[in-house]
Image (cartoon, grey):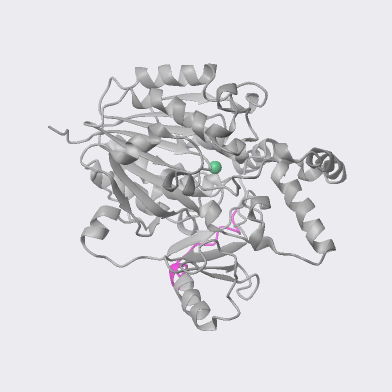
Amino acid sequence: MTKKNPNILLVVIDSLRSDRITSQEYAKIPNIRKLIKEGTMFSQVISTSDVTGTCLGSLFSGVYPFETGITQTNIETSKMGFFKNLKKNNYKLFATIPKYTWFEKIIKDFDDYFMFDHTKWKEEETILGQLGNKALEFFKKNTKTEPWFHYLHLVDIHGTGSLVKVPEQFNSEEWGKSKYDQLLSATDSWLKLIFEQISLEDTLVIITSDHGEYVESDFDLRDMPNFYKAMRKLKKKFPQLTFLGEKFFLFVLNTNEKIKTRNIDIEKEKKFIPRGYTKYLFDDVIKIPLIITGLNTPNQMEIKNLVRQIDIYPTIARLANIEIDEKIHGRDIFSSIENNENEIPAYIEVGSIKPKTPGKTIGIRTSSYKYFRNRIEKNKDVFLFDLEKDPKEQNNISLDQPKIISKYEEILEKILKNSKDFSGEKISDEEKMIEEELRKMGYL
Ligand SMILES: [Zn+2]
């Protein structure tokens, strides 16, 4: 017999792209694959933004940031209905999270949590090390009181692996060509230990990510002997930009080269783009995985329908028999499919770590097209991609398709009709502190 409220394990693998799950050619992830076999995989899930805070805000509230005001620096826990409703249903709430103010704030009403300081990992260890063992112990200990909810946020692949070293046993091509993929393989092997602790009969398991990442399987910073030399030079020249990390310098270097040769073709050079700072919103960063397994979720099913990040919370809530009494933007995916409801375009925006300053690009994505442009000036930096003919988004057809542009602009304006403007509000001390922390960590 299934219990009224199942246990819920929510695994967020920070920066995990959708293609790492839908395709077999990258990392080796047998433990995640096993869950896919026993559950449902969603292959077209679109995150709200390209930075952690804004995306988690959407995940935990089911509401877009233009209404909650949740961004990379502003944490409105009162707007995160997911946790409140779990509590109302007598769930015990646990979290395993990285040590950042942002995470500490969102789990402040949890029953207990384990925090790992991965800033110390740089030269030390990954989740496979000592902290991983402690996290596992913490997890085991807290599966006793039911129903429990455990939010597990893993960051090993964040920044394409700039935070950690690849554990020796995964540091070879058989585990993936890039550091990103090797670390994903390592993460999967650790997750096995967690999955062994639960029974899919009475636990709902969700695997997703906050946003994706620009990464190429055949590309690795370690393969570029001149890169570090050039980066040191650039860092000297622009010390204030150091917080942006390796990728930003690579972006600058690469763009400089192209400008010199008058051959600027950013669309084909996505691997160099840093998240949250540009005018781009390619699927690399906003197409995320979603796997739902356990209880009565359909087995071996792939759902290709467009799903928005804000739909994940109401979907979990329905499966777990949790009522949502607040007004949200998202909808339960399974019932929208059962009822043959139409696709709803996903709203997307570039992130920002400046408090009360929204990211500079906004747009919408449907199964057919992606449209984005400058937030303030709607005719500036306009991009339109035909996702059916050009899934890699290499040809910007905005100039050839004025009709589609005006149709999509209309949809975008309709979505934003009742949006709130937070830019005039006072910046709190907490926001300033978080901004500073993010800069220091290079955490985008
Ligand atoms: Zn993130």
| Image coords of residue 110 (percent x, y) | 40, 30
Residue drawn at x 41%, y 54% as measured from the top left: 45
Residue drawn at x 51%, y 44% as measured from the top left: 75
Q: In which quarter of the image is ligand 1?
A: top right
Specify start and end residues of the magenta stretch as a single range. Answer: 414-425
- Place residue 107 in its image quadrant: top left
Q: Magenta span has 99?
A: no
Residue drawn at x 31%, y 22% as measured from the top left: 143
Q: Would residue 371 be found to the left or right of residue 93 on screen?
A: right
Q: Would residue 132 be found to the left or right of residue 226 on screen?
A: left
Evaluate whether residue 322 shows in this view: no
When the figure is inspected, residue 380 is found, relative to residue 233, above or below; the finding is below
Residue nearer the viewer, 405 or 385: 385
The quarter in which the C terminus is drawn is top right
Evaluate whether residue 27 shows in this view: yes
| Image coords of residue 85 (percent x, y) | 30, 41
Residue furthest out toward the left:
1
Q: Magenta span has 417?
A: yes
Residue nearer the viewer, 285 or 141: 285
